[in-house]
Amino acid sequence: MDHHFSRLESPRILIVDDSPPQQRALAELLRRQRYRVSAVSDGHQGYQYALARPPDLILLDVCMPVMDGLAACRLLKADAATRHIPIIFLSAHDDPDERVAGLMAGAVDYVRKPYSAEEVALRVRIHLELARGRARPPRETMRHDPEQVLVDAVRQLLSTHLDALLTLADIADAVGTYEKRLSQVFRQRTGMTVFACLTQQRMERARELLAGTTLDIQDIALQVGYNSAANFATAFRAQMTLTPRAYRQSMRQQGTPP
């Protein structure tokens, strides 16, 4: 490694992995690079630790008990106090869908196990250098509000899964909570149910596609989570009092370009 840090300026790395041997191997590797290293064993612990002592970078395993890495990442990225921290996922699975899910959740990188020590060290160094060039949020924006973090994480999850057939259990699991708490917090904070919010986001996206593209109604229906144009038209009309086709025509008459 080209950089030599003093003890005070040495970046702090948080390892979140439920395997003690993996923790030890990573910690030894990173300490040889003069980083300060801490380690915890599940996503919930990782999130709480990052709130208490924000690290400069997090190495996050995907599959863990209590709270998995994807759920932890969504919470970390929804929280003003931690969203600036770069997250690198570590996974034993060579699954393209999992990699995409990790990047969509907010990670900056994804390393497959078993990993090359040199590769991990280089990726950590690169992302620390990139993070130094980004301004951290001012302190007044960093008040921790766990309920608002949960709501923001759910909104972000829904916005990136408009075409998915999600259950409440799926959504709760994806943000590391349980269904009853999710329903209560979401309704208290937003005045609507999770699925009312999902419908609202789907209709907003549908309006954008109808006004700004020439996609077929069926294609738009599929993109916003409806299996048929008829079901989509019924839901759209309930929200907008117009059919999708009539809405598109009205936008064109107003001069909105496709």
Image (cartoon, grey):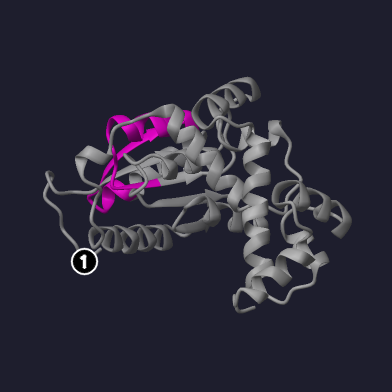
Using the image as rendered, state which of residue 195 and residue 234 is in the foreground: 234
Measured as percent of width and height from the top left, residue 69 is found at 53, 41
The residue at the point 59 percent across, 57 percent down is 99
Question: Visible in this render: residue 93?
Answer: no
Question: Which residues are the magenta region?
Answer: 30-58
Q: Quadrant of the C terminus?
A: bottom right
Measured as percent of width and height from the top left, residue 186 is found at 55, 29
Local packing at callout 1 (Cα closer than 10 Å; few below 14, some 14-19, many 20+) is: few
The residue at the point 15 percent across, 58 percent down is 4
Rendered position, 216 above or below 81: below
**The residue under label 1 is which amino acid type?**
Asp
For mark 1, what is the residue?
Answer: 2
Using the image as rendered, state which of residue 151 and residue 127 is in the foreground: 151
Element type at mark 1: loop
Q: Quadrant of the N terminus?
A: bottom left
The reply to whether the magenta stretch includes residue 200 is: no
Question: Visible in this render: residue 79?
Answer: yes
